[in-house]
């Protein structure tokens, strides 16, 4: 027996796969400045037009074993990943918000976030117009949901999100003389603020925690690669100190030793930041998107 809800869920998943397939095209062609609707899909390597069964989301990737049918060039794993992600996130929104206008808004925001995350990861470029569209839809959503108080909350959220990210971006001038982040991050945080209102603070906190999971290991890896092994050793000692302090020794002496290690680490890290010449651009839009999704599906 298939009930009505599961029947709808099935079609939401199919719709998610198709939209994901379309987002792949948007991510690629908006970067290449090509038309999104024309021309028909072709292999970027050999230029052969794809046959109809090469365009089925995920299924084609598996049938073709990740290679072009004509020239056997590898097909980017981006395609099935974006398709599956879109499907899952659409399904989550439907399960959480049911048959409602909220679901439609959430699906629209998810679509915007997927496209911006894709272009940010691929080329470190983000179309700010997408963020503006998100902000406008967020304001409309809150206006419909809670009238004028929702409208004001939405504007306050927009302001908080944009100002916080802009301040973080400009703090980069203090340490390195350049912006710490791109301008797009300010737009995206503002858009999320328009959607979540004052709750944007929680969303930004989620984004910060997500980014730490990637940034901290990456930072230490880069330090290690650049021969700055002292920072890595201090980092490991500092992490261990929490364990040791919690389980084995609890005296003022060990505490003092660990405080000194911690301060030495902080000093070493700061020196590392100032010295780093090949500074890596950090795509922050993916972290903001992840923060928004965690808040949307697990916190509210
Ligand atoms: Zn080919």
Image (spheres, grey):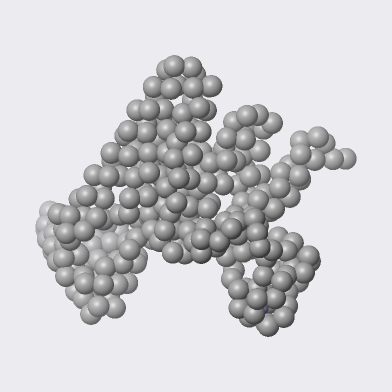
* Position of residue 65 in the picture relative to residue 77 (left or right): right
- Vertical order, 105 against 289 (above or below): above
* Vertical position of residue 73 compared to residue 255: above or below: below
Residue 25 vs residue 107, the one in the foreground: 25
What residue occupies the far bottom of the structure in this picture? 71
- Which is nearer the eye, 48 or 205? 48
Q: Quadrant of ligand 1?
A: bottom right
In the rendering, at what x and y percent does residue 47 appear?
Answer: 65, 76
Left or right: residue 131 versus residue 281 is: right
Q: Is residue 219 left or right of residue 69?
A: left
Residue situated in front as seen by the camera: 26 or 211: 26
Placement of the N terminus among the 4 image quadrants? top right
100 relative to 124 in the view: left or right: right
- Residue at point 49%, 22% (across, down): 143
Name the spot of residue 44 as percent of width and height, x first: 60, 73
x 23%, y 62%: residue: 238
Quadrant in which residue 101 is drawn: top right
Give the total number of marks visible in the rendering.
Answer: 0
- Considering only vertical position in the picture, is 181 above or below 236? above
Spot the residue most to the top. Answer: 148
> x%, y% of residue 278?
26, 72
Say whether residue 260 is visible: yes
Q: 35 above or below 92?
A: below
Residue plotted at (45% across, 51% down) = 127
Q: Residue furthest right?
A: 1
- State the residue at coordinates (70%, 76%): 48
In the rendered image, residue 10, in percent from the top left (x then y), is placed at 76, 45
Residue 62 visible here: no
| Closer to us: 101 or 127 | 127
């Amino acid at each position: 027996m298939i009930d009505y809800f599961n029947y709808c869920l099935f079609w939401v998943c199919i719709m998610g796969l198709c939209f994901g397939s379309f987002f792949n095209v948007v991510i690629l062609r908006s970067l290449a400045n090509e038309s999104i609707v024309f021309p028909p899909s072709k292999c970027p390597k050999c230029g052969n037009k794809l046959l109809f069964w090469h365009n089925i989301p995920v299924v084609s990737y598996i049938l073709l074993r990740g290679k072009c049918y004509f020239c056997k060039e590898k097909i980017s794993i981006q395609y099935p990943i974006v398709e599956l992600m879109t499907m899952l996130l659409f399904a989550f929104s439907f399960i959480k918000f049911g048959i409602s206008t909220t679901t439609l808004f959430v699906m629209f925001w998810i679509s915007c976030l997927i496209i911006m995350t894709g272009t940010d990861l691929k080329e470190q470029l983000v179309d700010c117009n997408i963020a503006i569209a998100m902000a406008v839809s967020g304001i409309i959503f809150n206006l419909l949901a809670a009238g004028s108080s929702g409208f004001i909350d939405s504007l306050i959220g927009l302001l908080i999100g944009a100002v916080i990210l802009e301040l973080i971006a400009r703090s980069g001038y203090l340490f390195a003389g350049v912006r710490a982040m791109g301008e797009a991050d300010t737009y995206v945080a503002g858009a999320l603020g328009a959607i979540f209102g004052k709750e944007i603070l929680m969303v930004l906190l989620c984004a910060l925690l997500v980014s730490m999971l990637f940034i901290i290991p990456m930072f230490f890896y880069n330090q290690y690669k650049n021969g700055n092994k002292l920072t890595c050793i201090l980092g490991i000692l500092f992490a261990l100190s929490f364990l040791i302090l919690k389980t084995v020794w609890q005296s003022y002496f060990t505490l003092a030793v660990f405080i000194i290690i911690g301060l030495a680490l902080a000093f070493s890290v700061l020196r590392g930041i100032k010295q780093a010449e090949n500074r890596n651009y950090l795509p922050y839009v993916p972290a903001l998107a992840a923060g928004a999704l965690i808040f949307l599906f697990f916190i509210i």
